Amino acid sequence: MKALVVYESMFGNTAEIARAVADGLATRYDVTLAEVREMPSADSADLLVVGAPTHAFSLSRPATRADAARQGEIRAGAAAVGVREYLDRSPRLDGLAVTAFDTRADKPMTGSAARKAMRRLRRLGCRPVAPVESFRVIGMTGPLATGELGRALRWAQSIAADVR
């Protein structure tokens, strides 16, 4: 079985979580890990996992990515395209197993990029197979909060064990 983990990452924190998720899924799946700017096709995937940072309580937009770039040094090409645009350009994905995760500031917050991504994935015909998950980042640019990489690995391992 094949899994595709697609992620957007400005400062590298979401990328670190995506790698841990890919490692966790690798116990059962042949995993492809791809940055969203590559616009990878989900055509041959049995499972799609989408990850994004939470910007302004939702998925990033060009303006919020530009604002993040003003806050600190971002990863090369990170401001060009995000999960929002990836899902906007996606064809229907009827029946594809999906879940999503996000990274967010380690403080009380109501919005979630993962919940927004999951709503968009459902509209594309996808089949949610696990609740979305949020992983905590200290401050705007990181680092990840203690224990979050291990938690991401365990979350993905549980998805790999449960999804058929």
Image (spheres, rainbow, N blue to C red):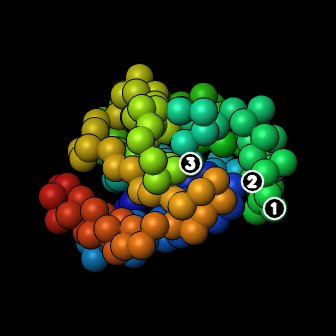
Residue type at the position of mark 2: Ala
Point 54% across, 42% down: residue: 54
> Marks 1 and 3, Cα distance to the nearest angstrom?
15 Å
Point 46% across, 32% down: residue: 111
> If you read the primary sequence from the N terminus, does the residue marked by circle 1 or circle 2 appear first?
1
**Image quadrant assignment for residue 139:** bottom right
3 vs 2, front mark: 3
Residue 164, can we see it? yes
Secondary structure found at label 1: loop
Point 49% across, 38% down: residue: 113
Q: Estimate the x, y position of residue 142 in percent, counting from the top left.
A: 60, 64
The residue beneath circle 3 is 53
Image quarter hosting the N terminus: bottom left
Secondary structure found at label 2: loop
Point 15% across, 58% down: residue: 162
The residue closer to the viewer here, 100 or 69, is 69
> If you read the primary sequence from the N terminus, does the residue marked by circle 3 or circle 2 appear first?
3
Residue type at the position of mark 3: Pro
The residue beneath circle 1 is 73
Residue type at the position of mark 1: Glu
The residue beneath circle 2 is 78
